[in-house]
Every structure is written in structure tokens, then in C-alpha cells.
Image (cartoon, rainbow, N blue to C red):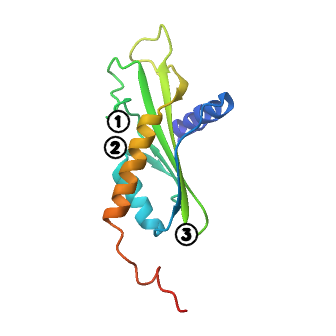
Amino acid sequence: MSSQAVLWLVGGLAVVNGCISEPTMTNLDYPLPLIEKAIQASVVKVKSVTQNKREFTSDYLTKEGRLWDPIGNDPQRVVIKIAVSGDRRPYDLDIETLVEERSTGQPSHSVGFKAIGTSKKLSQEIQFRIQNYLRQNSRRNLIDDFRAF
């Protein structure tokens, strides 16, 4: 998928620029399928998920968190990337919100955007939504939570 390659490139440029300082959720002692559902429910629209279901990328959004209209005149767009780390419980979540700005002089139908930073406010909002979802839907799972001794 070519848009995913562009996203990785933009993410790599943001790391090089040193502007990734996003909230991280640590010690999530929930089953992985519940964490996946929380991410799906918390992001407006998930565009892609890796095969191992550990990295989620949103569709383009506005800075307010609504779906971005490619035909519109919004000068900025945001993409959210959430990565689940840890091979077993408790898991950690890394939330990145990359803000891109339309390159100057580009017409509205062009795809000329460059990474300009991150949106801490939107990252915190997504983190809050995930926490609420996990709290509201955390039923004890007999298989996952069974402890023999």
C-alpha cells in the first residue's frame, strides 16, 4: 500500500526532527483483543492495521478529530498511529499524532504535504477515549485471568 509507505516516511522524518513526544499508556493489564477494540472505537476511522494487529493507522483527520476532506481547503491534516508493544500482558501503547501542512503554492487537489509536528491535545483525547473504553468494557475473562496458585 503506497499511502502506508508515505506515512512511514513522514513518521521517519518526524523522528529525525525530534518532534515525537507523545503520551504513552503503560501497564495495560487487559486482553489484547479488548485493547484492539478500544483502539478501533477511539479513533474516528482506522485506515490500516498491520497483520499482527499491533500497529493501527488512522485515516486523515482534521486537528479537531473529524475526517479530513481531501477536496476541502483545510491547510492541515493529522494522522494517528498507535502501536501496541509487549509480547504479553501488561501491554504498552504508543500514540503518535503527526500534523501535516499543505505545501505553499499547492492547489487544493494536490497531495503536497509536509510534516510540521504533533498534536498533543488530540493524542491526549485519544488516550482518554481508550482508557474510558477499557474501563467500561473490562469484564473478567475466565481463561486469560485464571491463576492456578
Residue beneath the point at 48% across and 20% down: 101
Amino acid tagged 3: Arg
- Depicted 87 relative to depicted 140: above or below: above
Q: Is residue 135 in view from this perspective?
A: yes
Residue named by callout 2:
44
**SS under mark 2:** loop
> At x 54% / y 23%, what residue is drawn?
116
User: Would residue 84 be found to the left or right of residue 140 on screen?
Assistant: right
Which of marks 3 and 1 precedes in the sequence? 1
Residue positioned 58% across, 31% down in the render:
10
Q: Is mark 1 on a helix, strand or loop?
A: loop
| Residue 144: image location, x then y, percent | 47, 79
Q: Where is residue 134 in the image (x, y as percent from the top left)?
A: 38, 62
**Residue 124 bears which disc, if any?**
none
Residue 51 seen in the current view: no
Label 2 to label 3: alpha-carbon separation: 26 Å
The spot of residue 58 in percent (x, y) is 43, 42
Amino acid type of the residue that numbered disc 1 sits on in the rendered structure:
Gly
Residue 65 circle label: 1
**Vertical position of residue 121 compared to residue 132: above or below:** above
Q: Nearer the viewer, residue 23 or 70?
A: 23
Quadrant into which the C terminus falls: bottom right
Whether tag 2 and tag 1 are in contact, CB under 8 A, the answer is yes
Mark 2 or 3: the one toward you: 3
Marks 2/3 in contact by CB < 8 Å: the verdict is: no
Q: In this view, does 104 lie above or below 39?
A: above
- Which quadrant of the structure image shows residue 7? top right
Say which of 131 and 88 sits in front: 131
Mark 1 touches mark 3? (CB < 8 Å): no
Front-lying residue, 2 or 10: 10
Would residue 37 appear left or right of 114 to someone viewing this image? left
Task: Read off the residue under disc 3.
Answer: 89
